[in-house]
Image (cartoon, grey):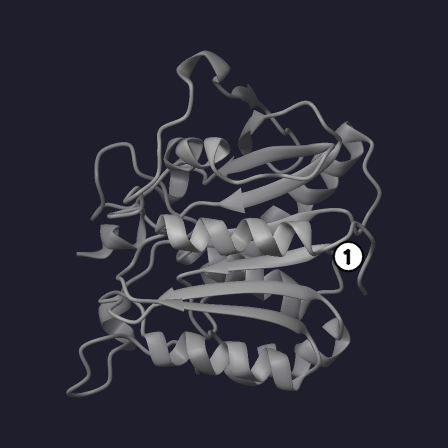
């Protein structure tokens, strides 16, 4: 069931956010993407949700992820036109993804390492436009944005990092996978020194753990500053990963990385 690329099991061990501190929903006309934003600072922490999910599923994390001073949560909402037909009511997707088509004979989980989905290219272009809009609106400098996501959202974030020269402060890959391995690997050398946080469950039954492990190793080999957090769990973001993410954010000083 492809909607599992959303946030099934994501809330284990994590407290809900205070409803009184709800998000501001912001229209971004150039990209056509709405963002749900919490915080007043100029430094954006842009997170992309998974397949069949929505920005609402990020809200509990505003009570547990500790942004540095001046930080602002920015949760992007995938377009209405890519709403998946196989997900829960109200769920969104960055592109319609048929994971079954990426399974080799006899394999239970998909391998996207040789794939370059058209929808991924389009989504990455749209998010790059959104990144410029958000930074212009907040008055933040290029290179001060933390970009990341969960599952399909992590794939889009990594594609931007490794196939474009978009300035980034840090990259967050939560339960993602290696897509278009040849192209991503070629692009990694240009990101030498970029701080990357990557976490994946050893019992993930949606996207393969070994592919995430391979992605982490290739980034490290290419000179990126990789924090690799494997955990004993499935397709989720448990409290232990949030704890490690907070340590990562504290240890990553603001400044552009080319």
Tell me if I can see residue 183 in this picture: no
- Where residue 255 appears, as percent x and y from the top left, is 83, 53
Q: Is residue 13 visible?
A: yes
Q: Is residue 14 above or below residue 196?
A: above
Report the quarter where the N terminus lies.
bottom left
Q: Residue at x 15, y 87 (%)?
A: 106
In the picture, measured across the screen, residue 39 lies left or right of residue 135, that is left
Say left or right for 135 vs 227. right
Q: Which residue lies at the image location 25% right of the left edge and 48% below the top edge?
A: 9
Q: Is residue 216 above or below residue 134?
A: below
Question: Percent from the top left, x then y, of residue 8?
Answer: 25, 47
| Residue drawn at point x = 79 percent, y = 34 percent | 136
Question: Number of numbered discs present?
Answer: 1
Depth order, front residue of 67/213: 67
Horizontal relation, residue 114 to residue 224: left or right:
left
Of 35 and 62, which appears nearest the observer? 62
**Residue indicated by mark 1:** 167
**Quarter holding residue 184:** bottom right
Locate the C terminus by quadrant: bottom right
- Left or right: 207 as drawn, with respect to 121: left
SS of the residue under disc 1? loop
Task: Look at the picture and state if 240 lies above or below 45.
Answer: below
Residue 48, x across and y down, in percent: 49, 46
Give above or below for 225 relative to 255: below
Q: Find residue 171 and report its horizontal and vertical position in percent.
A: 62, 59
> Depth check: 56 or 28 in front?
56
Circle 1 packing at 10 Å, graded few (<14), some (14-19), many (20+), is many
Residue at the spot 45% in from the left edge and 37% down from the top edge: 61
């Amino acid at each position: 069931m492809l909607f599992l690329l959303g946030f099934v099991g994501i809330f284990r061990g994590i407290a809900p956010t205070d409803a009184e501190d709800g998000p501001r929903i912001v229209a971004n006309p150039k990209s056509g993407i709405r963002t749900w934003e919490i915080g007043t600072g100029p430094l954006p922490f842009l997170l992309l949700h998974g397949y069949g999910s929505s920005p609402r599923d990020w809200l509990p994390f505003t009570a547990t992820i500790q942004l540095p001073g001046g930080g602002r949560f920015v949760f992007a909402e995938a377009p209405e036109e890519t709403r998946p037909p196989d997900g829960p009511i109200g769920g969104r997707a960055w592109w319609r993804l048929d994971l079954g088509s990426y399974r080799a004979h006899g394999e239970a989980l998909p391998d996207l390492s040789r794939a370059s989905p058209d929808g991924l290219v389009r989504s990455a272009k749209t998010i790059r436009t959104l990144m410029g809009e958000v930074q212009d609106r907040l008055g933040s400098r290029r290179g001060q944005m933390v970009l990341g996501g969960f599952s399909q959202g992590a794939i889009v974030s990594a594609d931007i990092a490794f196939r474009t020269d978009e300035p980034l402060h840090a990259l967050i890959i939560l339960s993602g996978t290696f897509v278009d391995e040849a192209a991503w690997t070629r692009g990694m050398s240009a990101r030498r020194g970029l701080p990357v946080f990557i976490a994946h469950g050893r019992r993930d039954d949606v996207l393969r753990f070994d592919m995430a492990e391979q992605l982490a190793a290739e980034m490290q080999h290419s000179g990126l500053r990789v924090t690799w957090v494997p955990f004993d769990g499935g397709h989720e973001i448990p409290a232990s990963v949030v704890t490690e993410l907070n340590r990562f954010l504290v240890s990553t000083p603001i400044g552009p990385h080319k």
